[in-house]
Structures are given as C-alpha cells and as structure tokens.
Amino acid sequence: MKTFNQSPTAPTFVQNPYPAYDSARAMGDVVWWENYTMPAAVSHRAVRMILSNRDLGREPLAPPECPAHIAEWQANESHSMLELEPPRHSRLRGLVLRAFTGRKVAAMAPEISATCHRLIDAFPDHPFDFLDAFARPLPVHVIATLLGVPTDRCDDLLRWSNAMVAMYQSGRSYEAELAANQATVDFTAFLDSYITHRRAHPREDLLSDLIAAEEAGEKLTGEELISTCILLLNAGHEATVHTLGNALKTLLPLTFRDVTPALVEEVLRYDPPLHVFTRHAYKNIDCFGLEIKKGQEVACVLAAANRDPDFAENPNRFDPTRTLSQHQSFGSGLHFCVGAPLARLEISIGLQILFDRCPNLQISEAPRYADTYHFHGLTQLMVR
C-alpha cells in the first residue's frame, strides 16, 4: 500500500482537491493516507466495495475514550443511526424511511417551490451572498417542515447545526469542540421541550410518527428520538447547502440552464459536498490485492471515486449529458443517504426556479472554498 501525503487543510488542496485525488488514485485502489494514519479508498470500485461490504461498518470494535468537554455531543452521537449498525440501525432507519417515501417527498414540491420564490423575491439589487440568501435558508426550512419543527426557529437550528457538524472537520480547535458540545445541550433542551408540547398536539409529520413510536415503548427511546431529530435536521440541510453553492459556482459560467435529472446527478458527481466517509473493518479485508486489517478505520474518498476515469470518461469535465451508473456522493450500502430523494428534489426545483427567475444572475467575486474538510463547500458565493 503506497503512502499518500496530503494535508487536508493545505490551502491549495482546500480550493481544489481533485489533482491530489488523481495522484492518489494513480498509486492504486487504496493508499495509506499518512495525514489521517489510515487506509483510504480512492477508486470507484474500491469505495463502492467498502461501503457495500457488511464486514465493515460505522461502529468501531473498540470505542475511543470520550473527553469530558464533549460528553454531551458524544452521548448524542451514540444514539445516531449514522453511527450505528444493525439491529439498532435497522430499527431507526425503518422509522425514518416513513418520511422519505416517493409520495411524501413528491408532496414537498409545492412547499419547496413557494420557499424558493419567497427567497428570490427578497434578493437585493446589489451584489449579495447566494449562500445566505438562498442556499442556507431553503433546505433548513424544508427539513424543518418535513420533520414538524417550528420554522421560526430556523436561525437557531442553523446555528446549532453548524456548531455540531464542525466536529467532523479536519484540524478542529478545542474552542470548536466546546461550541459543539454547548450546541448539543441547547439543541437537546429545545427538542425536549418541544416534544413535550407535541405529545399533546400531534400532527401529520415525522416528529409525530417518531413520538408515537417512542410511546409504544419498543421501537424508540427518548434519547434515540432526540438524536434522530438532530441528525435529520443537521444532515437534512448541511449537504444541500454546499451542493447548491457548488452547483451554482459551476453552472453560472456555463450555458446549461435546463435542470434535467442528468444535470442534477452530474452536479452531485462533479463537486460533491461530502468528500470522505469512514468505515471500521470487522475482520481482515482484501481490497483488490491490498489488505485492510481487522479493527482498522478506512476512509472512503467519495469525491475521488466520482472522478475515477474508469467510472466516468473525462471525469474532470462537467457534462450534464452523461449516462452513468451510481456515483458515490450519497454513499452506498446500508448507510446510503436516506434523504437522497429529497435532496435531489430541492436541487432540481431550486436551480430551475433560480434560472427562470434570474436569467442574468452572475458571479460578482471570485468564490473560495472553506477550510472545512471533509466537507467541501464555499465560504460565500457573491452574485448579482
């Protein structure tokens, strides 16, 4: 296994990680990423195999000790289906899937459209940040509506979520860890109070379904209920914010304005919002001639898989006419993104309404990516 040296916080890598991925892939399907001290799958076939292999999972064989200053954050994580394997994962995912059936997702289209028009109506005449004006408020409003959380608390939800997901970023500071822990405390207190209110006032939404399951006493505990709500609110907007920003950065200098399903998939393949997802090996794994040892954590570099020339011809070229098998931006296997249908719908409706309403939209300042790896999104996108 060849060694790949690349700091995830190096400025050139933050702005454009794809040449580094090409270099890593040239070394083999799996490389030893020295900066993470773990193997990293960088080819499409290796990433897909690892994500789909039940001998690798999210739960480590030996959970690390948790520092006291992030105890509340870690306690919440311990009940998150994103960090669990069956049978707990299956039970929680089965409950959440109730909200993401084709019928229920399609029923969100009018709400998504109305929210897009409302946000565009408020665009100023002078240059403005597209992320603040559109990409951030749209998905948090949509996921809050689907879940059944008051949309007038969206600013709080965004603030808590941004603090909590900073825990997944490379080179996070002690101050960021304290902020994440406090956000978890505040987020939990809000949900605990609101769930108490909603027990007496159920409605037709996912939160009411989850409360009913918790009250049944067999499918969901109180801690799992709160953790699941936090996960859905965090994951339900974070990736879509980055996807909308990255997509508009790519599309505005080009001529593509017909938002087809193929264009949405190419947007997701070309510059995805999440670049790395990890697994733990439950036994020694042979990955195309390279061994991943039992107990070892392995990084699946989703964005490198998407730019693999064995998967996509001329992979560094944006081409919305491609016909591809599955890209890895939503993952694969047991932990395939449960919200993928909703994300696709938001991206499709959001971009099309934006192009229809604002045909002369232009980038007004050179965009830059934020130092938030393993997320990949812009600091801002100034447009006019």
Image: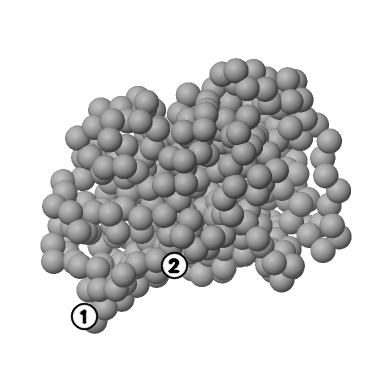
Q: Residue furthest bottom?
A: 126
Q: On the picture, is 102 further left or further right than 35? A: left
What residue lies at 57% left-to-right and 68% top-to-bottom?
159
Under mark 1, the amino acid is Asp
User: Residue 177 occupies which quadrant of the picture?
Assistant: bottom right
| Position in image of residue 307 (x %, y %) | 38, 37
**What is the quadrant of residue 114 in the picture?**
bottom left
Provide the secondary structure element on which disc 1 rests.
Answer: loop
Circle 2 Cα neighbour tier, 10 Å, few/some/many (<14 / 14–19 / ≥20):
some
At horizontal 84% and vertical 57% (from top left) the residue drawn is 67
Q: In this view, does 187 lie above or below 26?
A: below
Residue 373 visible somewhere in the drawing: yes
In the shown orientation, is residue 318 left or right of residue 380?
A: left
Query: The residue under label 2 is which amino acid type?
Result: Thr
- CA separation, marks 2 and 1? 21 Å
Q: Where is residue 377 in the image (x, y as percent from the top left)?
A: 44, 58
Number of the label disc, if any, that sits on residue 379 = 2
Residue 58 seen = no
> How is the rendered protein coloured?
one colour
- For the point 52% across and 28% down, the residue is 29
| SS for callout 2 | strand
149 and 54: which is toward the camera: 54
The picture quadrant where one finds residue 189 is bottom right
Residue 354 coordinates in the image, percent (x, y): 22, 59
Q: Where is residue 4 in the image (x, y as percent from the top left)?
A: 58, 42
Residue at x 43%, y 40% (from the top left corner) = 22
Q: Which mark is residue 125?
A: 1
**Does label 2 or label 1 sit earlier along the sequence?**
1
In the displayed structure, does residue 289 sit left or right of residue 133?
Answer: right
